[in-house]
Amino acid sequence: MRTAALVAAGSLLLTTPAPASPSTSASEARGTAVAAARAASEGIDFGPCTEEQELPPTVECGTLSVPLDYARPDGERIRLTVSRSRATGKDPATGRAVPRQGSLVNNPGGPGVSGMYFPMLGVVPGWKRLAAAYDLVGYAPRGVGRSAPLSCTDPATFHQGPAPAPTHPTAAVKRERAARAAAYARGCAERAGDALQHYTSPNNARDLDVLRAALGETRLTFLGSSYGTYVGALYATLFPSHVRRMVFDSAVNPAPERIWYRNGLARSAAFEDRWADFRAWAARHHAVYGLGDTARKVGGSYDVVRERLAREPAGGKVGPAQLHASMLKAAYYDDHWPQRAHALSAYLKGDPAPLVEQAEEQPEAAAEAENTRAVYLAVQCNDAPWPTDFAVWDRDNTRLARRAPFGTWDTVWTNLPCASWPAPRQRPLDVRAGAGELPPTLILAAERDAATPYDGALELHRRLAGAALVTERDAGSHGLAGGANACVNAHLTAYLLEGRVPGRRASCAPHPAPAPRA
């Protein structure tokens, strides 16, 4: 699949939206300085985490106060939850003392995902050297979890049960989904009120600077994954003198014209490529799964499962939409491939249990899922202009879906509330750093990543002078730091512990494909 060509074809049909308000101002810059100074004085009162947070005793928790609106730093404030595990100070291999290098702060992506669990990685073998030198710090960004949580609808109604997922939806389906998206956007405005407009990526970057100050750090050491790379890129643009070391893991394309509608088109095209990777892998292991000895035949087996679920949901719980949501995870992470292939195989042989286990919607997770979606939409819809006429979405994505059907319409339904978003739209910041403005930074990227296509890493690399790009060739897992590739991890460790980067560009051979499991 020629991803770049597909995106270009879709992008030609995007009409120019109305002008948006600037994403940053002098008053917000002054407000951030006021809030950071206040946070440096107050610090964070860390203590035991609550039972609800489900963190081990090695992790401590606290809260951080930040302005809701940075243009009014003395106005309403919200509190963000923060977690930390202290540096062990001992080399895990030798037991020798290791100098502390400060706090390593993580944003795992989203928008809408909490990083509160990040400090738990300190006990994982691949992270122990970093945990010896750094306090590992996670946090829930504004709107997420217990950090001034956002909600746009009653979580009890969020999971609708078995649902269809047509690859080429009819006009009636499109009208129904557009109406549903508009209702969701109205719900966001009704529940959040005027506060809704302040859940943005630039404010997430400002919150990060206040967190840096509260931790007692004069400069920030940061690891951002996926959407977290965009927060980091904004931070590097807004606060270049506050950067110590910064890792961009699976980078979002930060070009202003790509935020966020055109990035969605790029994702849809890339998911088709990654879906082809899964089908080719399953075909190589036809002897184990029996799904077909060619990628085309594996796709046919998947279509059979989808059609049967449309007639009779598995266990009364899993329809085509739930199946598709589960299979999207296989496009993110190839370590999901054996389980997904097994579930399809078992279902076709008469056993729906593995598929139901993997794909059913859990009622107890509905509140978290709804919160994640609310924050995701609030941030992305606020960040930039979106087409307001559904005809634009329809033209772009109908054309794209002819050659990239796997993820195209799912992406549309996810993002469509932005077409009728009630809050003001911002004009995306032009992410950029010239020579000498930043210390060396590190970008990690996989060539076949679908969630953040590789051209995003190339674009970020062009925009940040002094950045080093480490590429995992011929691989597509999303999120490389601490993962299965020892070469990538060696570059990560050398950078965070010693500040070493591998020149402007380096590459790593792909990690091994997952082994099939019966």
Image: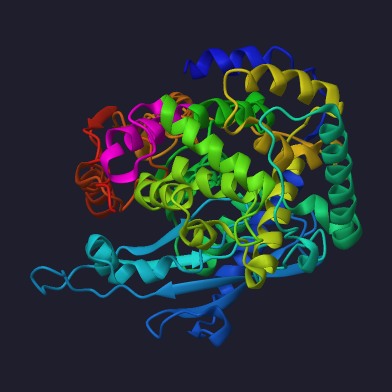
Q: Position of residue 89 (x, y in %)?
A: 23, 74
- Left or right of 184, for residue 429: left
Residue 310 in magenta stretch:
no
Quadrant housing residue 334: top left
The residue lying toward the viewer, choosing from 314 and 264, is 314
Span colored in magenta: 273-295
Colouring: rainbow
Residue 281 in magenta stretch:
yes
Q: Does the magenta stretch mainly form a helix, a strand or a loop?
A: helix
The residue lying toward the viewer, choosing from 356 and 144, is 356
Q: Residue furthest left?
A: 94
Q: Is residue 38 visible?
A: yes
Placement of 259 over or under 2, stated as above or below: below
Quadrant housing residue 446: top left
Q: Position of residue 200 (x, y in %)?
A: 70, 48
Q: Position of residue 351 (x, y in %)?
A: 47, 58
- Left or right of 56, for residue 193: right
Name which residue lies at 85% across and 48% down. Answer: 185
Name which residue lies at 82% across and 40% down. Answer: 177
Name which residue lies at 44% across and 73% down. Answer: 84
Placement of 364 over or under 251, stated as above or below: below
Q: Is residue 25 visible?
A: no
- Left or right of 438, for residue 307: right
- Left or right of 333, for residue 355: right
Report the label total.
0
The residue lying toward the viewer, choosing from 291 and 370, is 291
